[in-house]
Image (cartoon, rainbow, N blue to C red):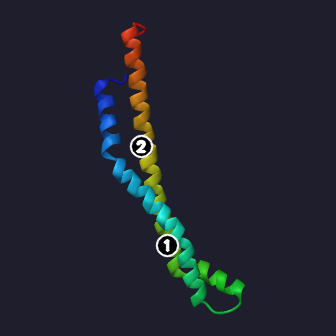
Amino acid sequence: MINYNDAETALNYLVNTDEEAARAKALYDGLYEQRKTIKAVEFLNATGSAAERTEKALASKEYQQHLVLIKSAHIDYEIFKNKRASNILICDMWRSVNSNQKKGNI
């Protein structure tokens, strides 16, 4: 059963990770948007028809490396998001249990 210490730990986690979670989200969003710039630069540096240049840009080392960064940032952000959601559920559960105990339902 969830007790006061569990709820306190969960709440402290939420308070202490606000900034870090925001930074993880901002990093992911920034990298995701920057992919367009990386692709455009690689497109301009490529030769051939427009279709060939597009394919070369998408296959370029720089673009592929950037996609790896995006994936890593997305994973980090999703882990934060999920951990925070779990801790919110712990706080909510404790609140329900505590309320029921005060009413004599448990």
Seen at 47% across and 56% down, the residue is 75
Q: Secondary structure at mark 2?
A: helix
Q: Secondary structure at mark 1?
A: helix
- Give percent across and percent down for residue 31: 48, 67
Seen at 71% across and 83% down, the residue is 51
Q: Which residue is mark 2?
A: 83
Tag shown at residue 3 = none
- Give percent across and percent down for residue 97: 40, 18
Seen at 42% across and 35% down, the residue is 88
Quarter residue 101 falls in: top left
- Vertical comparison of 77 with 42: above or below: above
Check whether the beta carbons of the residues at disc 2 and disc 1 lie within 8 A of each other: no
- Give percent across and percent down for residue 35: 54, 72
- Vertical comparison of 51 with 74: above or below: below
The image quadrant where one finds the N terminus is top left
Quarter residue 25 falls in: bottom left
Answer with left or right where residue 17 lies relative to residue 66.
Answer: left
Residue type, label 2: Lys
- Give percent across and percent down for residue 30: 47, 65
Answer with left or right where residue 6 lies relative to residue 33.
Answer: left
Residue type, label 1: His
Q: Residues within 10 Å of mark 2 (few under 14, many from 20)?
A: some
Work out how far the residue at label 2 is from the one at label 1, CA to CA, in angstroms.
26 Å
The image quadrant where one finds the C terminus is top left
- Nearer to us in this view, 39 or 64: 39
Q: Which residue is mark 1?
A: 66
- Vertical comparison of 53 with 27: above or below: below
